[in-house]
Image (cartoon, coloured by chain):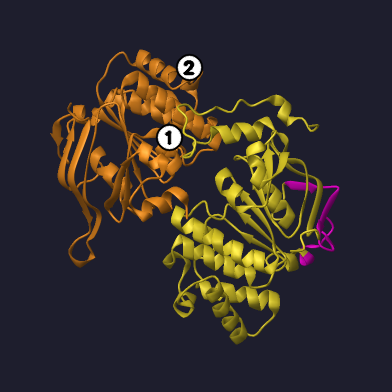
């Protein structure tokens, strides 16, 4: 695996919102690079993990201001890219998988038609070709009866199936990077492992870089190669997933201790004591 | 000892005729006072429906439910209702958005005609670790964890024997979850409460519960206890799947 070639380089990314109560900084100086790997981004609600993902896709409301010293995706400077260039990036070169397929799929379009739309829009293929590619893709995400599923509407498919459809849609245009924002949080445990296996199989085999945003420490630990821990808009620690146990930052340690664990039962869970110094930029 | 709750051959069916769906199919269990019983299973397995029948939220079920030795039916007296209180998953949805915390906490007291209301509200806020000034706040001015504390306070204010906890921490962050689970454990120790906890998270169930039932398609596929769950010695493959995620 050629993981030394980095796909995405971010330096000092900031996302600010202008509000009536003054500017709020949701992401405050985030720097990292993504290669052809599975990079987990962990944090609690409001830590800025999803904002980081959306800033890369430039999918933020007008009131948001994105500044960075560097925001490089392959050869493209995302800061300077025009809206037209961004449209060729979103969904084609960077895919995005969101939490709940019930909300991220178009409810009034059959799933086959939505996947096909991606092929027609990004790959400029004919209607018939789009349909064939869709059916092939549905088969690749292990949907047993692609023909039947093709004609179903999002409300007619289960959560796991919906997420497979999402993945099929994202992989159709062979992106070099995928941002998965809590892709399994809405799924049951047994389905979750299947979706993770599928992501693993399709992403590793194609050498796609995966940014895996999650609040689930256990899942990220077992699924990802490397983990960034975010707190209040900053990355407080970067660590190999296999070494998460030896995390240094008190926030990471606090999170790990707050987690009830089947293999290490405790009478009382440790409660995270937040330290104002974690908000400081210098670590 | 009389169990705090005993459920025997509970059957819940929704719909009629050929479209009838048996959500709970012959489930029996009992919880000793002061103990916690966990129901674990995936969405649609019937775990919340079991809870609904015990809480008196369902109009139709068959079987026997006894609360502290007293058989209850679909129709409950006020006193019977006060013995069983419920905490829901989503603290954003389970509190009235336009009622202050005080008004939310006063409502059960009014319904049940209890006096000395000001003292009771003050006491219960203290028990769940919220400062008194929160009385005059609205739910949107509180964090998720604080809201869940209010929901617990509302359940406690009628001094119930049994708390039904329906995924009480799955909408919360890990660090907040730890606070709420610790609070629930402390309250149980101090007041001798009995818990029925529904969750999809095996780690939470193993942390909180003495006995655990694994549900699938309306039935208990395995009833086990904490030690066996932690040791990983169980008979059913489905239990293993839920525990290990593979």
Residue drawn at 47 percent across, 20 percent down: B129
Q: For the residue carrying disc 1, how many other residues have a C-alpha within 10 Å: few (<14), some (14-19), or many (20+)?
A: many
Magenta-drawn segment: A64-85
Can residue A61 be seen at all in this image of the molecule?
no
Q: Mark 1 points at which residue?
A: B207
Queried whether the magenta region covers residue A76, the answer comes back as: yes
Q: Which picture quadrant has residue B126?
A: top left
Residues behind callouts 2 and 1 on a single chain = yes
Residue A9, image x, y percentages = 81, 53
Q: Position of residue B26 (x, y in %)?
A: 20, 51
Mark found first going from the N terminus, 2 or 1: 2
As displayed, is residue A124 above or below residue B40?
below
In space, the residues marked 2 and 1 are separated at their CA atoms by 30 Å
Helix, strand or loop at label 2? It is helix
In the image shown, does A8 or B96 lie closer to the viewer? A8
Q: Is residue B225 magenta?
A: no
- The disc placed on residue B132 is 2
Between residue A212 and residue B73, name the one nearer to us: A212
Residue B171, numbered label: none
Chain seen in orange = B
Residue at figure coordinates x 45%, y 31% from the top left: B181
- Dots 2, 1 in contact, CB < 8 A: no
Check disc 1 and report its element: helix, strand or loop.
helix
Q: Within 10 Å of the Cα at label 2, are there few (<14), some (14-19), or many (20+) other Cα atoms?
A: some
Residue B69 lies, with reference to residue B225, above or below; the image says above
């Amino acid at each position: 695996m050629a993981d030394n070639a980095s796909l995405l380089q971010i330096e000092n990314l900031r996302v600010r919102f202008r509000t009536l109560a003054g500017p709020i900084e949701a992401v405050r100086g985030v720097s990292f690079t993504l290669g052809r790997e599975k990079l987990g981004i962990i944090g609690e609600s409001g830590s800025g993990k999803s904002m980081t993902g959306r800033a890369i896709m430039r999918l933020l409301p007008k009131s948001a201001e994105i500044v960075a010293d560097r925001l490089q995706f392959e050869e493209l400077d995302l800061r300077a890219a025009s809206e037209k260039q961004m449209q060729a990036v979103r969904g084609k070169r960077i895919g995005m998988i969101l939490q709940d397929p019930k909300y991220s799929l178009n409810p009034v379009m059959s799933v086959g038609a939505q996947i096909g739309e991606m092929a027609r829009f990004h790959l400029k293929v004919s209607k018939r070709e789009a349909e064939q590619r869709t059916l092939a893709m549905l088969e690749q995400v292990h949907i047993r009866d692609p023909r039947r599923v093709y004609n179903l509407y999002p409300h007619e498919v289960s959560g796991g199936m919906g997420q497979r459809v999402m993945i099929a849609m994202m992989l159709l245009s062979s992106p070099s990077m995928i941002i998965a924002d809590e892709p399994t949080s809405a799924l049951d445990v047994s389905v979750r492992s299947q979706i993770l296996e599928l992501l693993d199989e399709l992403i590793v085999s194609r050498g796609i870089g995966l940014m895996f945003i999650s609040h689930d420490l256990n899942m990220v630990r077992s699924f990802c190669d490397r983990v960034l821990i975010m707190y209040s808009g900053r990355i407080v620690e970067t660590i190999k997933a296999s070494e998460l146990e030896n995390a240094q930052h008190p926030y990471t340690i606090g999170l790990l201790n707050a987690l009830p664990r089947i293999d290490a039962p405790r009478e009382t869970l440790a409660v995270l004591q937040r330290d104002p110094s974690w908000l400081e930029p210098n670590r | 000892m009389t169990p705090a709750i005993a459920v025997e051959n509970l059957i819940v069916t929704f719909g009629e005729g050929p479209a009838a769906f048996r959500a709970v199919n012959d489930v029996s269990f009992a919880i000793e006072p002061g103990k916690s019983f966990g129901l674990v299973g995936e969405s649609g397995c019937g775990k919340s429906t079991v809870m609904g029948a015990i809480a008196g939220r369902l109009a139709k079920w068959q079987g026997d439910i006894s609360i502290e030795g007293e058989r209850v039916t679909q129709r409950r007296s006020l006193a019977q209702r006060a013995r069983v209180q419920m905490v829901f998953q989503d603290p954003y949805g389970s509190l009235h958005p336009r009622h202050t915390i005080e008004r939310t906490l006063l409502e059960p007291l009014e319904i049940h005609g209890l006096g000395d209301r000001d003292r009771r509200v003050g006491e219960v806020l203290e028990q769940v670790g919220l400062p008194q000034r929160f009385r005059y706040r609205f739910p949107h001015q509180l964090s998720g964890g604080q809201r869940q504390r209010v929901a617990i306070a509302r359940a406690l204010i009628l001094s119930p024997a049994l708390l039904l906890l329906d995924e009480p921490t799955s909408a919360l962050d890990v660090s907040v979850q730890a606070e709420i689970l610790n609070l629930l454990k402390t309250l149980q120790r101090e007041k001798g409460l009995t818990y029925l906890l529904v969750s999809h998270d095996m780690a939470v169930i193993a942390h909180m519960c003495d006995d655990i039932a694994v549900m699938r398609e309306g039935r208990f596929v395995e009833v086990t206890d904490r030690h066996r769950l932690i040791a990983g010695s169980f008979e059913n493959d489905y239990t293993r799947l839920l525990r290990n995620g593979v």
